[in-house]
Image (cartoon, rainbow, N blue to C red):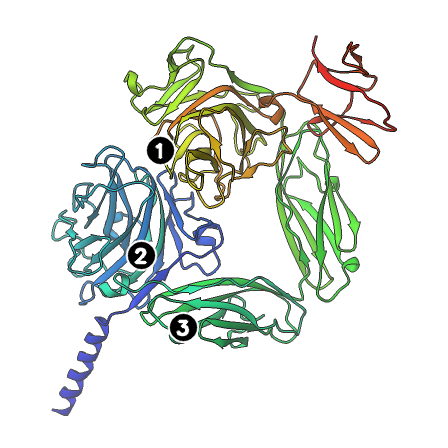
Amino acid sequence: MKKLFLIYILTLFAATGIIKANVILSDTFTYPDGPLVEATGSPWVNHSGTVPILVTNNGQIRLSGGNSEDVNALLSGGPYTTNSATVLYSSFKVRFTSLPGLAGTYFAHFKDTNTGPASGFGARVWTSTTNAAASRFRLGIGNGTSATATNGQIATDLSLNTVYTVVTRFVPATGVATIWLDPTAESDPNVTANDEGTPTRPNPIDVVAYAFRQATGIGALLLDDLRVGTSFADVAGPNNPPFISGVPNQHVAANTSTPDLPFTIGDVETAPVSLNVTASSANLVLVPNENISLGGTDSNRTVRVTPAAGQQGVTTITLMVTDEGGISARTSFTVSVGVPSISDVPNQTTPTNTVLGPVSFTVGDTESPAGDLMVTASSSNQGLVPDGNISLGGAGANRTITITPTADTAGLATITITVSDGASSASDTFVLTVFPLLGLLRSDDFNRPDSPLVQFNGEWLSNGGAGGTNAQQMQIIGNKVQVTEDGSEDVSTELPPNQPILPVYTTSSGVILYAGMRMTLTRLPSSAGSYFAHFRDSSTGFRTRVFVSTLNAAPGSYRLGIANNAAAITAGGQIPTDLLLNTSYFIVVRYNVGTGESKLWLNPVDETSSGLMAPDSPSLSSIEAFTFRQNGGIGVVCVDDLKIGTAFSDVAPFGLRITKVGADVEISWPVAAEGYTLQSTESLSPADWSDYSDQGSAVGDRKVVSITGVTGTRFFRLFKP
């Protein structure tokens, strides 16, 4: 009898332990920008596809229908089997930046161990425009493989660029899935999936992970604050994630500790004294976890890192704060022990047959004089940049690198600079793009009668929207292209093949594309705005997206923005200049096809003028066309004098630059200004122009004339007979 009684007690304990509420996965995605699965401390792994899910500079992940990678993260305490009483819940915040397709598809789900057929997925969160009003979309839930956009759909039209909280429930034993939108309690309105799933019952599976999926049809979305638990209260309701500030990266000598490094924590619901902070090291040989000391009180905490005796190297320290509800947030920093440092060299560009540099960088060490440090460099592309063509200079902490590309060769090379103190080393890499100067690719002044843009000589083609409906077509009006939120057609001009050896503008070609245009807004965009122009590949690879919006602008004005590939304006993605309606501005955009980097200039004089690099993560794409895009939120944009080329001077007006250099003067102009002659005169009344004695030497993409011992007055011009 006693034996039976003991068995009964143990069984009851096991059962109640299974259904105990618990947070089993939490992620605020506070990782550095880049692929999610490669981030330090990330629990996410790839199970399908190659084009990655990216972490953005806002601490979110971006899912896109144009990408292919699917990822999953294991749930602690799993597997959650079909013969248990466990019920699983998930929640996340989502903001769609472009619409899904009509049929749509699913982008999030619970997952079993199956890495093949989709039958191992449950509680599939669907998005589509089915049943939604124009420019709106809907969300829904599906049980299994037979789910569609209409199964379990929430009958609420949702808007782009609006944050929604999505909560799902999945019962592994039955396979039944339920979805809520912005709930505060489990009793709030919800929808349960009504697809059959498998022939016998919806879709029971043994759950081991939660997953995100990218596929054609989902549009584009930003997702944050994922929680997975075993009760509704674990993932939704009043409990918000805690906060933890960042800690700077550290360099220390061997056998020494970092100082007490301060950071702050906080939470809406949990008092700071009750927040639990833990720390871990990615390199336990260099820094064992027990060598990380946490201190401080309340909101103000500290961390001290003590490397193991005699060890040198680099480790990542991850700090995690957890509130009383089990929700966590984390931050990471690196500790370099006895390792020299090297400053970051940004990506570089140079035309073919042109020397790059000298480019400056700095080196240092906590133990050795900077002058004793040894610096070396290597190239990933020996055909473009042999190692012997890399020259290192400078002394002490201040060093330089000069690179001579192979003659008549274009492409990309990753240059690695390494600094060593004899025991340890550190490296920095940058991409050198050696770009061909292929001249002007496209030019259109739109000086023709008012008509749809696509009707002119076949140079402009419709590639989206209601191209057959005149009211929706993109129009030429008053010798300008009118790109308007009232229309829906997108129109592209294909870029001609540049040379037989470079039939397309591929990611390995070294090509850098520029587009210059004059633009005038006659109607203000919305606050969120949208993009109206971009480069594109043969499908949906949109790059160098140019935005207009009233975000951050004074009333009655607007601002310009740029993104590498993001479908909405990101932090730091606007030029901080208020622009006026009915005023013409000249803009230039640049897309490096090999690195995915984009830049925007407003009223530039030349390429050295101040511009804005797109802040979102680059994504590579071969380019075939340039597109104007009509979409809600852009107002009315009138474009004139479009030029597309492979150098800044191809698309911007030619002009002289005259610079005082000490007691001397330097005059320069674009190399691409072929057929132009530098002329001068001592007086403009009367003007007696004559060819100047020095017609300049090529330095990069400009011709330069240096004049010493300047006295008196002289005027210069570029003249083409």
Residue 699 spot, x, y in % from top left: 74, 29
At label 1, counting other C-alpha atoms closer than 10 Å, the crowd grade (few under 14, some 14-19, many 20 or more) is many
Front one among 164 and 257:
164
At label 3, counting other C-alpha atoms closer than 10 Å, the crowd grade (few under 14, some 14-19, many 20 or more) is some
Vertical comparison of 7 with 529: above or below: below
Inter-mark Cα distance, 1 to 2: 35 Å
The label on residue 210 is 2
- Quarter-of-image position of residue 433: top right
Vertical comparison of 343 with 660: above or below: below
Q: Nearer the viewer, mark 3 or mark 2?
A: 3
At 65% across and 54% down in the image, what residue appears?
427
The residue that mark 1 highlights is: 633
At 85% across and 23% down in the image, what residue appears?
712
Query: Mark 3 or 1 closer to N-term?
Result: 3
At 72% across and 50% down in the image, what residue appears?
376
**Is residue 115 among what the camera can see?**
no
* Amino acid at dot 1: Gly
Query: Mark 1 or 2 closer to N-term?
Result: 2
Does dot 2 land on a helix, a strand or a loop? strand
Residue 508 spot, x, y in % from top left: 56, 34
The residue that mark 3 highlights is: 272
Front one among 56 and 472:
472
* Amino acid at dot 2: Tyr
Q: Nearer the viewer, mark 1 or mark 2?
A: 1
Residue 576 spot, x, y in % from top left: 51, 40
Does dot 3 land on a helix, a strand or a loop? helix
Q: Marks 3 and 2: CB-CB under 8 Å?
A: no
Inter-mark Cα distance, 3 to 2: 30 Å
* Amino acid at dot 3: Pro
Residue 411 spot, x, y in % from top left: 61, 33
